[in-house]
Image: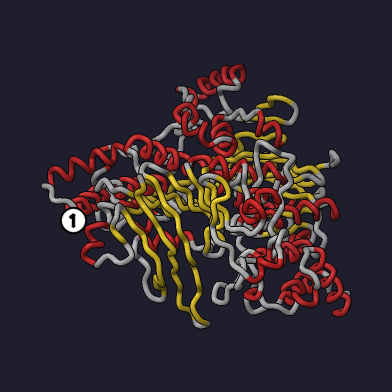
Amino acid sequence: MSNETMVEIKHLTKEFEEKKGGLFKKKRQKVYAVNDINLKIKKGEILGIIGESGCGKTTTARMVMRLLRESSGEIWFKGKELCRLNDRETKKIRKEMQIIFQDPYDTLNPGMRVLDILMEPLNAHLSHISFKEKVNMIKDMVEEIDLKPADQYIYRYPHQLSGGQRQRVAIARAIILKPAFVAADEPTSMLDVSVRAGILNLLLNLRKRMGLTMMFITHDLATASYMCDRIAVMYQGKIVEIGQTQKIIHNPTHPYTKALVSVVKDLNYFIENREKLIRDGEVDSSQQTSGCPFSMRCPHEHERCNHVQPVLTKLSGEHFVSCHLENKENFKRQEEEAVNAI
Amino acid sequence: MTILQVENLSTYYKTDRGEAQAVENVSFSMKKGEMLGLIGESGCGKTTVAQSILRLIEYPGRIVSGKAYLDGIDLLTAKQDELEKLRWKDISVIPQSAMNALNPIYTIGDQIVESILIHEDVSKATAIKRTEELLEMVGIKKNRFKNYPHEFSGGMKQRVAIAMALSCNPKLIISDESTTGLDVLTQAQIIALIKQLQKDLGLSIILISHDLPMVTSVCDRVAIMYAGKIVELANTQDILKHCSHPYSNGLLNATPDLSNPDKEVVSIPGSVPDLVKPPTGCRFYDRCKARMNVCKEESPDLKEIRPDHFSACFLEGGGYYHVQ
């Protein structure tokens, strides 16, 4: 892995408008799906993004892939600012970055054979090569994803494939143009455990062979720890902790990460100590606070957590966390700033 | 004391191509106050086992044979009116998606009160009091008695479903993937709640799940199913330390482990056999690394390889020596 940055996200934000209220008095409320996040993905690296449903991890990937327009912020990829590209330039850049979706039952056109499915990206981006060459490329690709022999698979329709095989085809479709960057959005969460491992190992092998850079989105910390070099933990549109996988697992610092790690590492420990790890009871997540997004579930909640939003602060090396508890000096300064602002 | 004894249960589903043997010859028993995990991948028949015990199998499914004794009464041959008395009072279920299990046009309080009034001969005031206690037990404040299901989050609705399952003090509770689809932390909180209630009230629970780490953390015993059959059944510690059947082992090896980052996860090649025309021999034959000639012709029965440890494999020691 080099130190070269492949993708850089700066202050990326996506807000949706939510309509609330009764029949006549409609209130519009802004909801932040992704709230001012900054990320760098190094060349050849697998960066994991984990978090619960609705935390903004898929929205982030979709914005990077230009499938969703951002509200504000910048996305840099190979020296280009993606948010400013026009449609034709965006299409060109798509050759270099691709996405693997979650559900292999939804993402493959049921009326197309594997050959047609894989032909589409080639037709869109490599119109200058002959049909025969394209077929050969497809056969090579199909063998690459361990569907051997290729002749047996390329004339099949998706319904003639198992879930794992479908996901392999979806992966083939994403990497057939040899992209530099791939976002994998929960690629294994719909698959059975015995098949899942094969897909994970396939992705790791492809990274090795093709030098892929990857954004790996998952809600499962164990899978993330197996796949990723670094992990970013998201909560309600914010990155709350980011660092090398081993750091996150052995030295989780944000209370949310701590709770997550304890659940996956030792569920019984979590069950016995759950009062210390997370607040039980109901949380209204639609209610937005001006402070820390986790304050409503945090067992260590302080007065200041309700009012002042913590910022990502360096702990060591590449390990950053966004929590007032870990960040007392910083907090003082911020509190003063907040007081001054009022 | 045995609370549930299932013997040779077989349940088939009618399809266009013939009958799919979704559950074939499943036997197990459960002690009072025990938490039994029933795990396996999608389509392995774990939910069908639960539905058969609850007699909820409807056309095109049918229970072909078998017995399921709950405290001496055979659930599979009980008459309809007997069943209605048994359900909820003796055996209840925490369903997979509480969102669909609750009636959207009644308040949650009314729904629980109703289930108590139908099954028990008590006054409405008593039922309301009991409902309030139940809600408190699962961590829902009293003042939410009159709220409708849509006013609750997913995890909270699951808590309501748990309260409802407990409403008539059942002897046996079946939790059918009741935490699937919830966020990791909410999931853990719900499991913690179920475990706590089990301890405090001495409940007997069958926990159906596909999440191996979760089941092995909270259950006393684990039954692993594959293609309609139980392949291994043992105490949790035995499953983890002396895992024998090649499929159970494959499952353990396919699961990433947070505390062991160097472990390479390995998938099980191949796919599940067609249950309409299941193989005559072992159903795991096609995918098994250690298959022998006998496995193709004969189907292995679940046999005791060590005290209280059962495995359905022809290998010596139910596969134990092969695996180690």
Residue sticking out furthest to the left: B123
Give the amino acid at mark 1.
Ile
Colour mode?
A: secondary structure
Viewer-closest of A195 and B305: B305
* Residue at 85% in and 54% down: A209
Residue B58 lies left or right of residue A89; in this view the side is left
Q: Position of residue A189 (x, y in %)?
A: 60, 55
The residue carrying pointer 1 sits among few (fewer than 14), some (14 to 19) or many (20 or more) residues within 10 Å by Cα, namely few
Circle 1: element type: helix
Q: Position of residue B96 (x, y in %)?
A: 42, 55
* Residue at 45% in and 78% down: B14
Look at mark 1 in the image and give the residue it sits on: B118
Viewer-closest of A180 and B235: B235
Any part of residue A63 in sight: no
Chain of the residue on which disc 1 is drawn: B
Viewer-closest of A254 and B174: B174
Q: Position of residue A285 (x, y in %)?
A: 44, 42
Name the image quarter holding the N terminus of chain A.
top right
* Residue at 60% in and 30% down: A322
